[in-house]
Structures are given as C-alpha cells and as structure tokens.
Image (cartoon, rainbow, N blue to C red):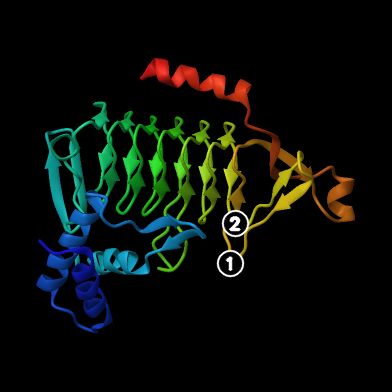
C-alpha cells in the first residue's frame, strides 16, 4: 500500500506529463481516493497560522477527471448514473463504521472522508475530496462540494450549499470549522472560511465578493482574490440589506443584499443546540 508521499510524487510526475499512461493515472488516483477516504490526506488542513491548501491533491483529482470515461452504473432499478468511472459512488455502509446514512437517495462520491458519528439525511450529496468531521449532521438536500472542509459537530441544515473548489488548484476550498450551525438554504462559496462556533441564520449567502457587515464591532469583513472572506469565531450572521450606491439607485429605493453580524454566540445561543442532540 502506497503512503501519501509516494502517491504525491507519482501524481506530480503524471500531472507534468503531456501524455501520461492512463493505467498509471488510474492506479495513482485510486490510491489517492483511498488515503482521502481514510483521512490520511486532506485537500486543505488547519495549521497554527491558518489553513493550508494541498494543491497536489487537487491536481490528482483533476487528473482523474482528465483520463476518466463516462460509464453507466445501476444501483437497484431506481438509480441510474452516468459519470467518470474513476470517481464512483462510495459504499458508505461497508466502509464507514459509525456513520449513519438514512435511506432516500443520498450519494457520497469516492475520495470523501466521513468521521465517526456523521449523520446524512436524504437526499444529500457529498462530492470528491470533501472532509467531514465527527458527529456532523448533513440534512436533506444539502450539498458538500468538492474538497470542502467541514469540521466536527457542525449542523448543515436542509438545502444548505457548501461550495466546491477544484480549480485553480491553489485556491482555498470552503472551510466550515467545528461547532458551526448553518441554517436552511444557506450558501457558502468561493473559499469562505466560517470560523468555529459561528451561526448562520437561514438564507445567509456568503462569498468572496460580498462584504460582511459587523454591527457589533463596527467592522466590514471582505474577501479578495488572494484572501477568502472570513466569518469571525462565534459570530451570528443574518441576511440583511444595504442601500445601493448612486443617485439613480437611491431615487428608486434600491437595496443590495448584505449579510450582517448581529451578535456573538453566548449561552442563550448555545441552548438552541439542545434540539439537535434530541434529534440524534
């Protein structure tokens, strides 16, 4: 069995080749998916100075798409797929002790790490390269995109969308840290980092191009091409609006969407999490 460094060296050599051997690529990508599923490798991981991207992991996944062929798959009579044969669905029950996948149409792709105690309600989708921490709940119609990093004890409510980032390979994926609550219909995109214990109210949309207004500290948080938007630790974010600039817009009362921090998490906010424990 190859170790991560050996897999990395093979994938980097194959990625640099103009015409790599398809069989060698498939073998290397299969080994990459296996170490991703075991949690031995991540597309990005936390360090003392912040999160770091492992670009070689993304390059390996992109290489798999490059050489993969679309094939038909059938799971019973109700589910039919046509996708790259290099990234089939993961057989979660047989590979993940302590993970609960409720019947009803959920798909987890190969190359996903699911820690013990994860619960996935149907239908949901978890894409290749994602990492999901222990005792996190992924609710109905939720999406965890490619290479997204979701921490422990997170609740992704119904229809929450955690965006995926495969290209460019050096781009930070979406990061949702430990003990975050993501409300129904939320969207977190473009490498946004939601720091631990934050609460996103239903309908909040976060991306690098949308400023986040902090009414508690009197600050505006912004992302850039080089730096993702960061939601501060413990922040409680709700959907809001701000006046559109320019005389023409003001004369018509036009407003722009604006996520707003209205408070920081305290004991009263924490008490709402008791409902999740009861549901478990």
How dense is the environment of label 2, judged by Cα within 10 Å: few (below 14), some, or many (20 and up)?
A: many
Quarter holding the N terminus is bottom left
Q: Is residue 69 something that shows in the picture?
A: no
Assign a secondary structure to mark 1: loop
Q: Do the residues labelled 2 and 1 touch (CB within 8 Å)?
A: yes
Q: Residue 225 carries which label?
A: 1
Give the residue at mark 2.
208
Give me the residue at 54% from left, 45% from top. 195
Give me the residue at 38% from left, 30% from top. 140
Q: Residue 113 carries which label?
A: none
Relative to 185, is 250 above or below? below
User: What is the distance, in whole Å, between disc 2 and disc 1 at their CAs?
Assistant: 8 Å
In the image: residue 245, left or right of residue 25: right
Q: Is residue 19 something that shows in the picture?
A: yes
The image quarter in which residue 129 lies: bottom left
The image quarter in which residue 119 lies: top left
Give me the residue at 57% from left, 67% from top. 226
Looking at the picture, tell me which residue is in the foreground, 158 or 232: 232
Relative to 233, is 34 above or below? below
């Amino acid at each position: 069995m190859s170790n991560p460094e050996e897999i990395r060296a093979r994938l980097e050599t194959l990625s640099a080749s103009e015409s790599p051997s398809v069989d060698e690529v498939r073998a290397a990508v299969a080994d990459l998916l296996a170490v991703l599923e075991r949690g031995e490798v991540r597309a990005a991981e936390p360090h003392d100075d912040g999160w770091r991207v492992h670009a070689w992991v993304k390059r390996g996944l992109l290489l798999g798409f490059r050489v993969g062929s679309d094939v038909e798959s059938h799971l019973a009579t109700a589910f039919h797929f046509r996708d790259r044969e290099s990234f089939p669905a993961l057989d979660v029950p047989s590979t993940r002790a302590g993970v609960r996948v409720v019947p009803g149409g959920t798909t987890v792709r190969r190359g996903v790490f699911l820690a013990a105690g994860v619960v996935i309600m149907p239908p949901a989708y978890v894409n290749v390269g994602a990492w999901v921490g222990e005792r996190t709940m992924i609710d109905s119609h939720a999406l965890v995109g490619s290479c997204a990093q979701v921490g422990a004890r997170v609740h992704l409510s119904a229809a929450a969308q955690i965006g995926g980032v495969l290209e460019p390979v050096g781009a930070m994926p979406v990061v949702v840290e430990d003990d975050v609550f993501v409300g129904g219909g939320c969207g977190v995109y473009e490498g946004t980092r939601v720091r631990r214990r934050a609460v996103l109210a239903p309908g909040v949309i976060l991306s690098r191009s949308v400023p986040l207004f902090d009414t508690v500290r009197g600050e505006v948080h912004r992302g850039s091409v080089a730096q993702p938007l960061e939601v501060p630790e413990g922040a409680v974010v709700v959907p809001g609006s701000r006046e559109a600039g320019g005389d023409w817009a003001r004369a018509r009362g036009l407003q722009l969407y604006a996520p707003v921090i209205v408070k920081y998490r305290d004991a009263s906010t924490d008490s709402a999490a008791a409902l999740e424990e009861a549901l478990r």
